[in-house]
Structures are given as structure tokens and as C-alpha cells.
Image (tube, helix red, strand yellow):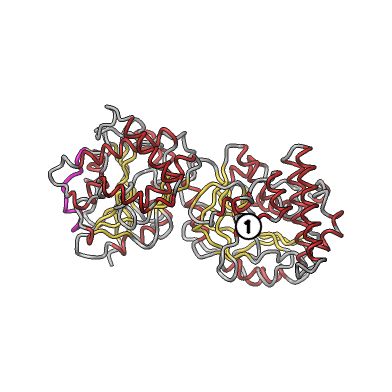
Amino acid sequence: MNHTLDVVIPAGGDPGLLQRCLVALLCDGHDIDLRVIVVANGPASSQNQASAELLLRAFEDERQTLIVVTNTCPGKTAALNRGDRERRGGAVLYLDADTIILPGTLAAIVAGLATDEPLLVAPPMVLVRPEGRLERGFASVWPRLSGMENDVVGAGVYATNPAGRRRWSAFPPIAADDLFVRSLFARSERKLLAAGGFLFNLPRRWDLIRAKRRWDHGNRTLAGLHDVRPGNLPTRSFRSRLGDVARLWREGPALACFVLLALSARLTRGENDDAAAWIGPKPPPIAPVAPRRPRIGICIVTHNNADEIRACLTSLKSCWSELSIRIEDNASVDGTADLVRQAECRTKIRANPVNRGFAASVNRLAVDFGEEVDHLLLVNPDVELASDAIDQLIAASLVSEAEAIVGGRMMRHDGSVDPHNCLAEPSLRQSIAFALGLRHWPGGKWLDPDALGGWGRTGIRAVPALTGAMLLISRALWHRLGGFDEQYFLYGEDVDLCIRAKRLSGTTLFTGFARYVHRGGASSASDTQRWIAILRGKVSLYRQHLSPLGSSLARWLLLGGIALRAVAETSGLAGTKMWQDLWRKRDLWRRGWPQPDNSLR
């Protein structure tokens, strides 16, 4: 197999987005002879050129080729044609500069194009779920339209082999370059790859309407080209539209939002929707990232985890980053520290004579890493990561337009999804849902805010808060936040961190592609002790993030919920005695965590 691939990137947008795109290519290009060609054009050509040139050294260190050229002619297709002049003539990937590929994408493209027959391939598109109602509706319906589902869509990412590239000489001056190329390949010559993927950020609000107008205009201009084969394009006849409505009617509100947005784009057409102009979304400036492969500092806090720590350390792998691992052991008596020293030469461990608590220990580990890492990865010792989990977290962090805390998909040992990795922020509604046990009611997924509307923990989307079993956070954001609040000894510090991050214009992002198995509660001697710590964390969150009246009401609701469960156990409706124990020991948790003891720092 010829493991070579040329990548042509027209760069006319935000330089920060281009830099993130290039970092993802650099990370995913192992075992592939890459030749990446960046064509800086448009008003920001000098900024994009400078941004791309920052990665020249990193590509050289990885024995890859990065070529940066400028183009004076306006328009994306002019940039594509300029980039084609730098190709070697083999397989080629055309990639928009605001796109982030997922781990394994380049290898899947190279393997998919290993044929002498003309072939057009693309990885699956993963829409980063937007937050607005109209945008969410559009995102739910658009990828499922006729001619898009299970087919090569393009959307700024498509690749072909040498035989396929000979189908056209140059890109015509139109906006829909991806549909133009698709029209040259029959259905049997198009392949949607099973592995990899690319992350696509939908524009927001009016930017989405402007982008939809540009897409529609580009589609209409295709009909005027003599070498286009209309039979290879998605059918948008009145009959096909009715078929889509009949097939997607169950989407209800989402379908209505899609139709409304499509009509808005149609009714607001203007003369500026010309094919040659680069009319793209205009997001706020994106912060640049380190112009190299990311460096990840992994922080693990142990307390009597000898049975789990070996499996955890074995699972810490990454093709996209350089890993450093540090452990702080909090007074383990089961030989955890000795086991780590014997089993892991790449791990530095510090043993404490007393249990300092999770938050304080992570803060110390973060200080130890200093500025030698770009991100901190917080991992519980009773967690086992999938082989690409860390790489998927990095990809999600690259696509985020704001500084992000990124978490993954928590699984149980039986393979089922544990929904507790994403939670609602502390609120009275959350306390009422817990007190009444709404999650166990019919339709409770819509009533319990922690259920997030019954969402199945798939895809990529912003969430209210993430649990700390596996969290990736940039070192810069961590320092801006001052790390964990050390009043939280165990449980609650992760939710507090997420709330404070969003107040600093950050975001908490979930990716269902980063999977991990969490044993849960392995550092607690019993379920009762673990729940005492959980409840203390909840009360502390109420105290810190609700009003005095709201905090008091939430605490009483929490007490009421425990009391109801204890009564159920006493009546024989439950087979445990944990809730009775928690009720009897309510004085241990109803006031939350005390302020940290500064003498231990």
C-alpha cells in the first residue's frame, strides 16, 4: 500500500482555526508520508501564512512536509487550483481550514483509496451540536436528507485517488466545490469511510442563514456547468422534499426549525450571494494552540487502589500527544505506591503520610507539571481508557471555539452507558428531582435535569457540568481558574470547576468518542461512606452557587429525599439499608465540606 497523501487547505478564515486544523493533521499523520499545502488567501492571508509557518518546525520534526503559499486571486476555488500546483500527483485530500479530523481519519483515507479505479471518499461528518434551538433543529435534520445520509457529502472534507483526480482539470469558480467533484463520480464510485471522521461546527444564528444562502447559490450554479452530471447530485425535487418530510416527521420541532431556517435563507437571497466570493461564518477570533504535538500531563490521585491502578496505567496511551504521568498517593495502606514504583518506569509518584483529599492533591500535581505541559488530564485510578480516548479528547478540545473542559463517555463493565458523567448545575429543580426520585418515574428523563432530556450521551455537545473521572483541561484555563477549590475534599470539586469555567467564558464539552470504563467508588470503603462524601459535595455546591434561601431549600429537599428512601427501606420496599444509614448519619453530611485546613498545604 502506498502510504502517501497530499492535503490541500484553502485558508481564508480565522488563523486560529487553521492552526488547530494543522495540529490535528500533524497528530494523525503517523506512518503516512504527508505533504500538506496551505494556500493563504483572502483578507487574512498574511495572518494565515504566519500561523501556518509556526508549524513548519513541528512538521519537520515529524518528518512530514508543510508548504505554505499565498494566492492573490480571490475565492476558495482559486486557492484550491493554486494548491493543486504543489501536489505530487498521488492521492489528495481537500480540507477546509476550519475542520478538525478525528483520530484514525488519515489512515482510513489512505486505505480507502488503495485502488486503481476512480474513487471519491470522505470520512463521516460529526456535527458539534450547537446550542441555539434553530441550529439544533437544522443539525438534527440536515445530515439525514436524501442524498446526504450514508453518502459522500463533502462539507469541506473529501479525497480522491490519481484516477479520480483525472476526472477534472481545474476547479470552476463556484462555491460548491465539494458537490462539483461529487457530480463527477457515480454512486458506485463514492465511498463513505467506516473509520475516522471530521468535526463540523455549524455557524450560528444569522451566520448559518448566510452560509445556507451561499450553499444554495453554489448548488444552483452547478446546473450551468457543462461537465456536471446532475444524476450524481442529491435530488432536491418537490417529490424528494415531500419524501424527506414523510420520513422525518417524527422529528417534529427539529423538522419545523429546519424548514423555517431553509425558508429564511431562501427569502433573504441577495446579490452578495455570488459564487466566487468567500462568504463564510464569522466567529470571534479563536485562540491559537501550541504549534506542535500536544503535551499532556496526567494527574492521578490514589488511596488504596492497588487492585485498579495497574489496569489504569496500562490504558494510558496516545498517538496524538506526548504523555507525562504523575501520581499523588494519599496514605494508602495496601501497597499502592510500591506497586506503581515497580510497574511503571514512566510514572512519578509522591506518597503522603495523610490523606490530603482529591482536590488539594490534584492542585499539587498541576503545580509540579508547571509549564512543561499544554493540557492536564485528570484520571481516576479506577478508570480504564479506550485506546484512542486521549486522542479523541484532544480532537474535541481543538474544535472548541472557547477554552474547554472536555470529558468522555463513561461506560459500565457490562458495556452499558453510565449517564452520570454529565450532570446539571446545582438548582432547586435538581433537588426536587432527587427528592422525588423523578428519574425512576415514567417520562422522568424529561423531568430530571440530570438526565438532560434523555440524551443518550452520544456525539459532541456542550453540557452543564462533567464529572471528574476523566477530564481534559488546558493548562492556561486551569491556572486562570486557580485549580480546584480545596474546600471540596472529595466529590463536588469537578462540578464547581465547570461552573467557574463557564463564568470565565469557557465551556464544558462532552465527546462520546472518548470512551472509558469507570469502576466507581473504589476509594471508598463502602457505599454509605461514598454517599456521605457525595452528599457533602452536593451541600457545598448549594452553599457556594445558590442564593442563601435557595441553598437552604435545596438542602432540606436533599434531607427529604434521603428520608423518603429510608422509609422505603424500612417498609421493605428496598433491599438495602444504605439510606437508613445515611439518614442516621445526616449530621456528617448536611453541612457540606468544611473549609480546607491550610496547615496541610
Residue 189 is situated, as x and y percent measured from the top left of the image, at 22, 60
| Quarter of image, res 313 | bottom right
Residue range highlighted in magenta = 163-173
Front residue of 296 and 115: 115
Main SS, magenta region, reads loop
Membership of 236 in magenta stretch: no
Q: Residue furthest left?
A: 226
387 w.r.t. 92: above or below: below
Q: What residue sits 81% from the left and 46% below the top?
A: 595
Can you identify the residue that label 1 sits on? 420
Helix, strand or loop status at disc 1: helix
Can residue 25 be spotted in the picture? Answer: no
Residue 60 is situated, as x and y percent measured from the top left of the image, at 38, 52
Membership of 169 in magenta stretch: yes
Residue 568 is situated, as x and y percent measured from the top left of the image, at 78, 63
Q: How many C-alpha atoms fall within 10 Å of the one at disc 1: few (<14), some, or many (≥20)?
A: some
Q: Is residue 234 found left or right of 212 in the rendered image?
A: left
Residue 553 is situated, as x and y percent measured from the top left of the image, at 78, 43
